[in-house]
């Protein structure tokens, strides 16, 4: 399940994305355990690929569903983990990124599909989303990575929906 589905609207998705924090961080051992659970890696050089991308791309053999495991690390991802919310998915409690953090990460990614997701979440969560919290987070990210385009991009999404800019 994708977080956009939880906070936005249902839509078809081609894969599942999950962030995990490995303690200790041993992606090779994790890959072996996933293979025993019916998942196959979609890359050969695990160590090299993880070093470049921080992602372990798997395929669930029984369903042919791609699963991307993002290896979380200190900093922003750790903050997102602490703010994650538990939601019920078919009777199972699943931790999902908070909608404010998801909006910020989608603005940071900045692709057309990500910005469409931002607008979907803004509409679906318009009564409860902490807009000022999103602005604060985006401002902090801008400062940390020396960019100045994230807040204007977010405001443009609000403007496109004609939502009140609280």
Image (cartoon, rainbow, N blue to C red):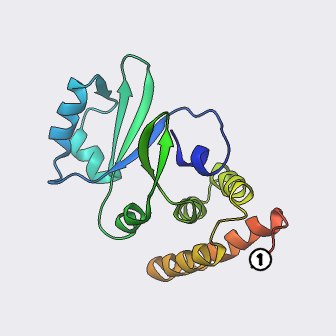
The single residue placed furthest to the right in the displayed view is: 162
The residue sitting at 68% across, 69% down in the picture is 154
52 or 34, nearer to the observer: 34
56 or 8, nearer to the observer: 8
Q: Is residue 53 left or right of residue 117?
A: left
Q: Residue 54 placed where, x, y %?
A: 32, 52
The residue sitting at 35% across, 32% down in the picture is 58
Q: Image height check: is 2 above or below 149?
A: above
Q: Residue 47 placed where, x, y %?
A: 21, 45
Q: Is residue 39 left or right of residue 160?
A: left
Q: Image height check: is 23 above or below 16?
A: below
The single residue placed furthest to the front in the displayed view is: 91
Residue position marked by numbered label 1 in the rendering: 165
The residue sitting at 44% across, 20% down in the picture is 64
Q: Image height check: is 39 above or below 86?
A: above
The single residue placed furthest to the bottom in the displayed view is: 143
Which image quarter is the C terminus in? bottom right
The residue sitting at 68% across, 52% down in the picture is 112
Q: Residue 9 placed where, x, y %?
A: 68, 44
Q: Which image quarter: residue 21?
A: bottom left
């Amino acid at each position: 399940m994708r977080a956009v589905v939880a906070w936005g609207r249902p839509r078809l998705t081609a894969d599942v994305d999950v962030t995990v924090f490995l303690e200790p961080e041993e992606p090779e051992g994790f890959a072996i355990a996933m293979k025993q659970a019916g998942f196959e890696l979609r890359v050969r050089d695990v160590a090299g690929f993880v070093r470049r991308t921080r992602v372990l791309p798997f395929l669930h053999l029984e369903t042919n569903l791609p699963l991307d495991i993002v290896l979380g690390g200190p900093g922003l991802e750790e903050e997102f983990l602490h703010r994650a919310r538990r939601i019920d998915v078919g009777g199972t409690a699943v931790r999902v990124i908070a909608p404010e953090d998801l909006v910020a990460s989608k603005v940071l990614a900045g692709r057309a599909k990500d910005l469409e997701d931002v607008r979907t979440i803004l509409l679906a969560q318009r009564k409860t989303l902490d807009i000022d919290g999103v602005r604060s987070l985006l401002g902090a990210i801008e400062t940390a990575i020396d960019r100045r385009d994230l807040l204007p991009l977010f405001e443009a999404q609000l403007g496109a929906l004609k939502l009140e800019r609280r």
